[in-house]
């Protein structure tokens, strides 16, 4: 049964990708891309990667789609007819694809428990991490503790992406006509529903943040979900009011604060006589040390991701608003 | 049939990867190129997660009485890659916005000969 679901979902994914190639209406392309992300999230669930599915659903289908729509608002929604012949790209793709298919025949069969990938570090993570780190969710243990350096690097990459976007676009505040017609002022139903839903989204984000040690979730997902709540707010009520709630300047400090919090845990563990990001020394008992360490660095990740996603949205949103697109 | 099931995931991955690649090299519109890149990227995620799956295993969260778990390591790598992916996509999109501002178009063939516009 599981194989059958897998088969159908993957086929739907392939059809969606095929449709995207031929569509000229970019709005439809972006919407299909959202569907594509949701389908991939479903496939990740059926392949046991619940944490990944969570991230893909909130990032791929949520944030990416919003950002692409924001870009379309500035660049126009139809792709012009292509004068180039599409023969050469087709040949290149078919040849590369054939080579890759030939390569897959050397892969170990899908799902076999004795595949090489399952024989090196993975057994250690699966057998030892519940004892060494004391968390039921192995993905969180590996992410935050065993591969803490890696995750810190990734948080820094996310932070630098925000620097990149802000220096390319910047957040423009409008000074006059503060009441601006941005947002969906006419739509009362949207207002009421948004007011009901936003607190629940934020509550859910907090749950995901702090329950990530035990179930699927963690800082990356929680940050994106919390950002989605504020993005919804600014879409419905307009950017000026969103700026009043969380100003772009505060977000800049928050983004840096998250990274510093993460690195700070490393510095504290060094001062306590351990290695950088060695949580065992943070408390008398190594297991509670691991708990403290993981909760704090996940919080740092969550804060940075939240602040970065929201500032990026602000940057795009304020561009689109300025150009008065109806 | 069994042979097909063994490799079905990988073949779909290759198909998606090539669709993304085709969009990147054939599309003129930069936003569509970014969508193509994202499809390419998701196919790589799919490849990693497919490799991590163990038949009969369950999600890598400890449960009483379960001994077979799927491999948690690819999940960790891909989870962070997704978030980094959206961050870099955002940088790409903001470059497109700047290109639109400088050249007035985001169709590749329309601005490629206008190097001195800036």
Image: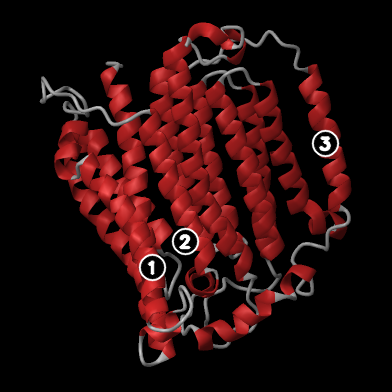
What is the spatial separation of the Cα atoms under label 2 and label 3, in whole angstroms? 35 Å
Q: Quadrant of the rendered structure where residue A129 is?
A: bottom right
The tag on residue A297 is: 1
| In this view, the mark in front (2 or 3) | 2
Q: Is residue B63 left or right of residue A271?
A: right
In x, y percent, where is residue B81?
A: 55, 52
Chain at numbered mark 1: A
In the displayed structure, B47 sits above or below B89; it is below
What is the spatial separation of the Cα atoms under label 1 and label 2, in whole angstroms? 9 Å
Q: Is residue A213 left or right of residue B73?
A: left
Q: Do marks 1 and 2 share a chain? A: yes
Residue depicted at 11% across the width and 25% down the height = A178
Residues at marks 1 and 2 touching, judged by CB atoms closer than 8 Å: yes
User: Badge 2 is on which residue?
Assistant: A152
Residues at marks 1 and 3 touching, judged by CB atoms closer than 8 Å: no
In this orientation, which residue lies closer to the viewer: B62 or A88?
A88
The tag on residue A96 is: 3
Among the two numbered marks 1 and 2 on one chain, the one whose residue lies closer to the N terminus: 2
């Amino acid at each position: 049964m599981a194989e059958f679901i897998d088969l159908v979902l993957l086929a739907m994914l392939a059809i969606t990708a095929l449709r995207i190639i031929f569509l000229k209406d970019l709005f439809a392309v972006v919407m299909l891309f959202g569907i594509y992300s949701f389908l991939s999230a479903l496939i990740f669930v059926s392949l046991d990667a619940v944490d990944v599915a969570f991230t893909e659903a909130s990032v791929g289908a949520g944030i990416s789609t919003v950002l692409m729509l924001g870009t379309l608002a500035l660049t126009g929604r139809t792709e012009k007819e292509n004068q180039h012949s599409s023969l050469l790209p087709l040949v290149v793709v078919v040849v590369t694809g054939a080579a890759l298919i030939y390569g897959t025949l050397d892969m170990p069969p899908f799902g076999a428990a004795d595949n090489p990938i399952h024989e090196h570090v993975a057994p250690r993570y699966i057998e030892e991490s519940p004892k060494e780190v004391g968390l039921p969710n192995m993905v969180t243990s590996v992410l935050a503790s065993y591969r803490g350096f890696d995750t810190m690097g990734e948080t820094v990459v996310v932070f630098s992406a925000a620097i990149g976007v802000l220096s390319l676009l910047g957040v423009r505040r409008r000074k006059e006509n503060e009441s601006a017609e941005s947002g969906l002022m006419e739509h009362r139903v949207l207002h009421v529903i948004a007011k009901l839903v936003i607190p629940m989204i934020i509550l859910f984000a907090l749950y995901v943040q702090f329950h990530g040690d035990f179930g699927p979730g963690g800082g990356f997902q929680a940050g994106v979900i919390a950002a989605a709540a504020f993005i919804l707010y600014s879409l419905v009520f307009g950017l000026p009011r969103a700026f009043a709630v969380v100003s772009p300047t505060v977000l800049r400090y928050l983004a840096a604060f998250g990274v510093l919090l993460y690195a700070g845990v490393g510095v504290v563990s060094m001062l306590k006589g351990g290695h950088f990001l060695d949580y065992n020394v943070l408390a008398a008992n190594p297991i509670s040390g691991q708990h403290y360490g993981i909760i704090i660095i996940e919080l740092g990740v969550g804060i940075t991701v939240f602040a970065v996603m929201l500032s990026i949205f602000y940057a795009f949103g304020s561009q689109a608003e300025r150009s008065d697109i109806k | 049939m069994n042979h097909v099931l063994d490799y079905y995931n990988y073949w779909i991955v290759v198909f998606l990867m090539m669709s993304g690649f085709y969009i990147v090299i054939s599309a003129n519109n930069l936003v569509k190129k970014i969508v193509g890149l994202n499809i390419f990227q998701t196919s790589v995620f799919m490849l990693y997660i497919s490799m991590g799956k163990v038949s009969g295993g369950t999600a890598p969260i400890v449960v009483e009485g379960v001994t077979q778990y799927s491999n948690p390591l690819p999940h960790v790598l891909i989870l962070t890659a997704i978030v980094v992916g959206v961050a870099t996509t955002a940088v790409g999109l903001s470059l497109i916005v700047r290109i639109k501002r400088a050249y007035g178009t985001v169709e590749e063939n329309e601005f490629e000969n206008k190097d001195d516009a800036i």
